[in-house]
Image (cartoon, helix red, strand yellow):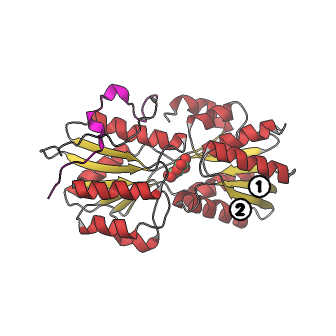
Amino acid sequence: MKKRLLAFTLIAAMGSALLTGCYAGYPAQTTGTAPAAEAAKPANDKLVVGFAQIGQESGWRDGETNDIQWYAAQHTDTIDLVFADAQQKQENQIKAIRNYIEMGVDVIAFPPVVETGWEAVLTECKEAGIPVILVDRGVDESCADLYDTQISSDFIWEGQQAADIVGDLLGGSGKVVELEGTVGASAANERKEGFDGELAEKYPDIEIIASQTGDFTRALGKEVMESFLKSYDDIDAVFAHNDDMALGAIEAIKEAGKKPGEDIKIVGCDGVKGAFEAMVAGEMNGTVECNPCLAEQIFDTAAKLKAGETVDKWIVSNDGVFTQEDAAAELPNRTY
Ligand code: GZL
């Protein structure tokens, strides 16, 4: 039984002029804050998707949000997107998901900010008969039967690619510091697993001398890099679990009087435009792309789930690997 839409932003009501997807430039971030007015659930057979976004912690996250909102605004005849911004708090994501259950949306999609703490709310989704799509992050194995599919990159592969770039840059030996993503996030856990494992297996003479979370943000990435630089004067390379933290590390290295990209090599993940600009400037050495432009896959998959079709448990994004050599040629193609 579908219920009335409670106070939430129906992105479909926004003009497409406000938003552009991963195929063009980006407007200022539109936040999915809950308006006061109550909206009646459309009395039609449009696909209603409730999306509980993590927040706005990185350029990558903004790219994902804009792509989803832009795509929904282009398809107002068939899609209604209900969007909430959880300000990086798991309890806000859970609240939004419970609202979507109350509304009776057709499908719920969200990037779990951390891997644990989802069993209760995912059980409620299952009991309500609402399919769930995990987007760009995963949940603990114990919840494997409580969601329908995960659409995301292969983070272990990303970590391994980053380790190979670092191994090549250092000629197989040196000292590395690691800026980790959000504590407990699958993207952070698995990038670390891939990076540390690849170094141990293929580059035994490269040592990780420090590893600490920068919470996927530029500001904290800079702060942690400042502390690393105070503690160690022999850092040869940084691996940052996302480009935003890598860009923060670049600032810290410059302020410490060293040359990022030369004295200390820098490798990140995501493939945001800023990383390509830094590589063209010679201040960064590589990035492993993590495609945030998942909107078409999300809504196509949601339509299949609404129609009762089964889909693959993991829909893996295809990502590229970029270094300074190909940065200039690739920069014009970057859309987030
Ligand atoms: C990856 C995604 C990560 C990005 C970060 O799929 O979950 O979250 O790498 C973002 O930039 O904060």
Residue farthest to the front, as pictured: 36
Q: Is residue 112 visible?
A: no
Residue farthest to the bottom, as pictured: 142
Tag 2 and tag 1, C-beta contact below 8 Å: yes
In the image, is 70 to the left or to the right of 236?
left
Highlighted magenta segment, given as a residue range: 1-25
Kind of residue at badge 1: Val
In the rendered image, which residue does mark 2 sit on?
199
Q: Nearer the viewer, residue 208 or 41?
A: 41
In the rendered image, which residue does mark 1 sit on?
176
In the image, is 124 to the left or to the right of 1?
right
> Residue placed at 70% from the left, 39% from the top?
284
Kind of residue at badge 2: Leu
Residue 308 lies, with reference to residue 17, above or below; the image says below
Q: For the residues marked 2 and 1, what is the alpha-carbon distance in whole angstroms?
A: 10 Å
Mark 2 secondary-structure assignment? helix
In the picture, the quarter occupied by the N terminus is bottom left
In the image, is 242 to the left or to the right of 39?
right
Residue farthest to the left, as pictured: 43
Residue 299 inside the magenta-drawn segment = no
Residue farthest to the right, as pictured: 233
Residue 323 lies, with reference to residue 50, above or below; the image says above
Q: Position of residue 123 (x, y in %)?
A: 32, 69
Q: Nearer the viewer, residue 134 or 91?
A: 91
Q: Viewer-nearest of labels 2 and 1?
A: 1
Q: Position of residue 114 (x, y in %)?
A: 50, 61
In which quadrant of the rendered view does residue 19 lie? top left
Q: Is residue 311 visible?
A: yes
Task: Give the mark, 2 or 1, whose residue is nearer the N terminus.
Answer: 1
> Residue placed at 61% from the left, 42% from the top?
244
> Residue placed at 26% from the left, 63% from the top?
310
Residue 93 lies, with reference to residue 254, above or below; the image says below
